[in-house]
Amino acid sequence: MPGRLKTLWRIMEGQRLRYGAAIAAILLSALVMYSRPLVVKVVIDHVIKNEPLGDEMPAFVAALFERYDIRSVLAQALWIATIAFVATAVISGTLDYLRGTWAARAAESIALRLRDRLYDHLQRLPAAYHDRAESGDLIQRCTSDVETLRMFLASQVTEIGRAVILMGTALPLMLSLDARMTLWACLVLPVVIVFSVVFFARTSATFKVQAESEGAMTARLQENLSGIRVVRAFARQEYESRRFEEANAAYRDRSHSLIRLFSFYWPISDFLCIGQNAVVLLVGAFYVADGSMTLGTLSAFITYVNMFLWPVRQMGRVLAETGKAVVSLGRIGEILAAPVEADRPAAAAPPAPAQGRIEIRGLSFSHGGRPVLSDITLTVEAGQTLAILGPSGSGKSTLIQVLLRLYDYDAGTITLDGAELRDLPRRHVRRQIAPVLQEPFLYSKSLRENIKLGRSDSDDDAMIEAANAAAVHASIARFDAGYDTVVGERGVTLSGGQRQRVALARALLMDPPVLILDDAFSAVDTRTERSILDALRRRHQRRTTLVIAHRLTTLMHADRIIVLDRGRIAQEGTHDTLVAAEGMYRRLWLIQSALDEDLDEDLEPAAS
């Protein structure tokens, strides 16, 4: 809990003065509000009944009465007391308005800054964190949990201050009026406080479970919407609906648990507070009857007790909201406490432009305790094309992710133009390497914005040149809006091949020293693939290219080919040397050649 308070104090930075002003407004409002029962007491006891001022009146009030003969003035113009009563209400209401306005503005500013901070932090968290986290739960924390915290900061922080000030102000006034009645008025106070603390403990645990259930439900909804086409293609609508119903029911059950706790708390707290009022009224009436207390004092005391019990009764609601905010603060804090990708203190980009020479020595990498790459050693000269082949799980994509510094390797070295990758800023490394993945991600923006993502300052001629090299310009030109065509979420309105070629154009426009094609032609027909490869070969002197593919026709023209198997380099050489040697490459070549021959034979009768 102290750690959460420190976190809360930190995120309130820049808005603490507004909260201080809000607390000051509460204090002034309490002082004005507590003067109203004194007005009633003075009118009843010292104007209407003409009783002398007693010791219960503050000394400065008694001095004012004697100096200006206020009793006579009020006796002849009782409407002055009415105006004073109304004025105190207006002043108190104005101060409450200022308190609410200042607190709300501070809360909105904090929430705005917190959302920006969370988004920025998530952008800089390592890939390993996102591998473990559910995107739906992260969305829940950045939206619902921030909103919960905003509501707490907007109302409950000042409510806590208000409760403390009202109780702290009421007790001295009540003691000055009648010490015996103060004891009777505080009879149930310990019971209510203990009951509220127990309620807070129960609701805090339940709020945490409810927030986790809501996060799981949001994650399931987000996952289902992202894969809606797969769900429909496999006719899984009913199954996915049942899964969502289960998550929704779990969230409902947790919410019902909270409702049951609230329904248990409010009636009991109401009963205790009403009972307390009844005790004060009965005991006060007895004291008035035996002459030990005036009627005006009883009237003022009943008003004070109601003011005093209101914050006590609200304590349960405030504590419940505090418990909910504490849970949300903890969930937000878990994200902010996660360490971001950090460069070495001395990391600096080299002054000379990168050439694209990559040298790997003894590289090893484990993921989740499982070895993925072991003792990888190879050199790719600047401008060369390296092809990478291997079965699924052999470590091809992992090697690319390590080159991009999405993951830090366990052992060995990787150098780019002689500079150790770990000694270079991640941002610099990723500006030198442009990847094109098998499942490219396109934003729900225009094709122009998607292609210019890496170089927004480039002109249209350069964009069209890159699109031509990626063999996608002709397809874009056929769209009604051309490059201004807005694609759907993740580029869903394009075909798989079009998405891959748009992603390739985006990478080519960056004109990086190193280009990575990670199975980037899997959705492209062989004729288009050949056209793209020819264009890349004409430009390959300008960049180092790493190609991952399963079609050997895609790899055969590379300067060098490596075959990965179980995280190790099993074979290395050119297409001709690998076909001539026994091994995985030769076996795959023979299989794919036989399949191509069978396909040609099947197509010949149709062509004739």
Image: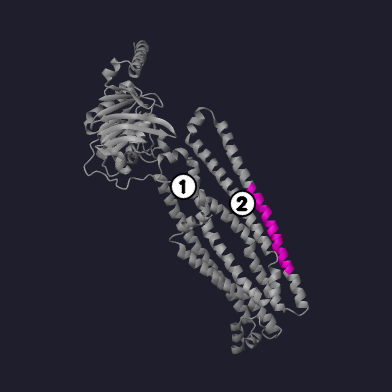
Left or right? Give the position of 33 relative to 537: right
Asked if disc 2 and disc 1 are in contact, CB closer than 8 Å, the reply is: no
The x, y position of residue 238, in whole percent, is 57, 31
The x, y position of residue 244, in whole percent, is 57, 37
The x, y position of residue 565, in whole percent, is 37, 24
**134 or 415, nearer to the observer:** 415
Image disc number at residue 335? 1
Q: CA distance from mark 2 to mark 1?
A: 23 Å
Give the position of the C terminus as an image quadrant: top left
Q: Quadrant of residue 323?
A: bottom right
In the rendered image, the vertical position of residue 419 relative to residue 103, given as above or below: above
The residue type indicated by label 2 comes to: Thr
| Magenta stretch, main secondary structure class | helix
**295 or 319, nearer to the observer:** 319
Q: Secondary structure at mark 2?
A: helix
In the rendered image, the vertical position of residue 60 relative to residue 477, given as above or below: below
Tell me, what colour scheme is on the image?
one colour
The residue type indicated by label 1 comes to: Ile
Give the position of the N terminus as an image quadrant: bottom right
**Which region of the structure is painted magenta?**
257-279
Image disc number at residue 362? none
Q: Quadrant of residue 39?
A: bottom right
Location of mark 2 (residue): 203
In the rendered image, the vertical position of residue 417 relative to residue 156, given as above or below: above
Q: Secondary structure at mark 1?
A: helix
**315 or 175, nearer to the observer:** 175
Left or right? Give the position of 523 relative to 91: left
**29 or 601, nearer to the observer:** 29
Q: Is residue 435 visible?
A: yes
Q: Residues within 10 Å of mark 2 (few under 14, many from 20)?
A: many
Point out the tag, 2 or 1, that comes first from the N-terminus. Answer: 2
Residue 322 part of the magenta-drawn span: no
